[in-house]
Amino acid sequence: MFSFIKPEFFDLFGIVVFLFIFCISMWGLKTNKKIPKWVLTVLLIIGILGLIVDGTIVFITYVI
């Protein structure tokens, strides 16, 4: 049924999710909200790594 959708298509959604995680963690670190700083740091690292991985896959698949 969905044989025309390549698995790399879902990396577009991954970019949005990792960008959201990155933005929330940066906001929390800048505003010193009550979320523990180590949680925000872990979220920031996950967001950056996810953006790099998914961004690379999307760039290679759809741009090049």
Image (spheres, rainbow, N blue to C red):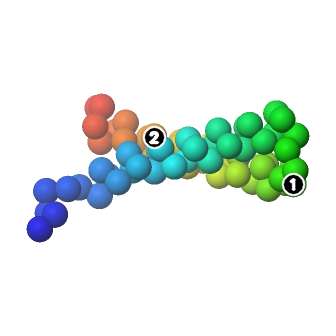
Tell me the residue at 44%/41% (across/down).
56
Tell me the residue at 20%/56% (across/down).
5
Q: List x then y, in percent, for residue 20.
A: 58, 44
Horizontal side, residue 31 vs residue 5: left or right: right
Where is mark 2, residue-wise? Answer: 55
Occupied quadrant, residue 42: bottom right
Horizontal side, residue 38 vs residue 9: left or right: right
Say which of 24 and 63 sits in front. Answer: 24
Where is mark 1, residue-wise? Answer: 36
Residue 29 in sight here = yes
**Secondary structure at numbered mark 2:** helix
Tell me the residue at 65%/52% (across/down).
46
Q: List x then y, in percent, for residue 47.
A: 62, 47
Q: List x then y, in percent, for residue 43.
A: 70, 51
Residue 53 in sight here = no
What amino acid type should be assigned to the residue bearing mark 2? Gly
What amino acid type should be assigned to the residue bearing mark 1? Pro
Occupied quadrant, residue 64: top left
